[in-house]
Image: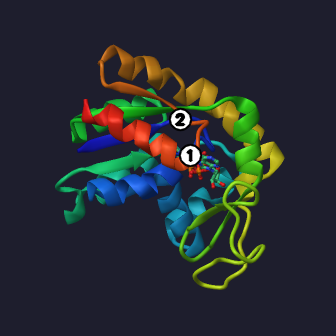
Amino acid sequence: MNLVFLGPPGAGKGTIATIAKEFYDIPHISTGDLFRYNIKNDTVLGKEVKAILASGDLVPDSVTIKMVEDRFTKDDCKNGFILDGFPRTIFQAEALKEMKELDAVVNFILDREEIIKRLSGRRMCKSTGKIYHIIYNPPKIEGIDDETGEALIQREDDKKEAILNRLDVYATQTEPLISYYREKGIIVDIDASKSPEEVFASVKKALAK
Ligand code: AP5
């Protein structure tokens, strides 16, 4: 199954993709995670995009498209994939059309107030990328990853100013993709305000149709 997870920052795309990738046995390809991996490892790409991610702006289309093209050459994409955070512009969607045919685009819907609560409370493990929330999904010991025992971090772009910029960028550059994919008849709308288990159950039901 070839899937795209679309939706505003903090809607839970990464959280649900972590459950869905096990269920469908397909890889979770998050462009945000790929960029953060490069930043952590101080690669040439990482150096190029570090400040862009911290501000919440988008990385240039050419750089992002090339990274996704490279990722698709890996064997694990043969039976499908979940793209999380790509495409984010109409230009990227047109490029993706040339690479892969999609089965569905899952559109996660969440209001602005809840988005801000989710993003400002998010914490993550720097080495494994595991996501927590200080209220909704706290670790067993405050501030510490359950598996590695490392201190959890807050993403640079989860600070207030960057969150507001990301919401603006989403509204102007990414939201037009909802109409783009609706016209193609492959959008599935999901209420993302429920618990992760309930949200995934809705995704599963919608995709089974
Ligand atoms: P990216 O990493 O893709 O960020 P994003 O789209 O803003 O999405 P997030 O990861 O913030 O949110 P999410 O929807 O995955 O929510 P999560 O599951 O973590 O991109 C980062 C940056 O990289 C971009 O700003 C840009 O610079 C660059 N970039 C990436 N792709 C690009 C592209 N295609 N083109 C150009 N630039 C690109 O959940 C959030 C929080 O809520 C967590 O704490 C979680 O525990 C909690 N939570 C989740 N679900 C629930 C629930 N159901 N109930 C309660 N709490 C929940």
| Residue 95 appears in the picture as rendered | no
Q: Count the marks: how many?
A: 2
Would residue 164 be found to the left or right of residue 201 on screen?
A: right
Q: Relative to residue 126, is residue 27 depicted above or below? A: above
Would residue 190 be found to the left or right of residue 123 on screen?
A: left
User: Looking at this rendering, what residue extends furthest in the right direction?
Assistant: 160
In this orientation, which residue lies closer to the viewer: 184 or 134? Answer: 134
Task: List the residue tagged with mark 1.
Answer: 12
* Amino acid type shown at disc 2: Gly
- Which quarter of the image is occupied by the C terminus? top left
Along the polypeptide, which appears first: circle 1 or circle 2? 2
Q: Secondary structure at mark 2?
A: loop
Say which quarter of the image contains residue 57.
top right
Q: Is the residue under label 2 in contact with that under label 1 (CB below 8 Å)?
A: yes
Q: Position of residue 123 (x, y in %)?
A: 70, 63
Pointer 2 residue Cβ closer than 8 Å to ligand 1: yes
Residue neighbourhood size for the residue with mark 2, other residues' Cα within 10 Å, grouped as few (<14), some (14–19), many (≥20): many
Would residue 156 be found to the left or right of residue 109 on screen?
A: right
State the residue at coordinates (82%, 46%).
160
Q: Position of residue 137 (x, y in %)?
A: 66, 59
Q: CA distance from mark 1 to mark 2?
A: 8 Å
In this orientation, which residue lies closer to the viewer: 71 or 66? Answer: 71
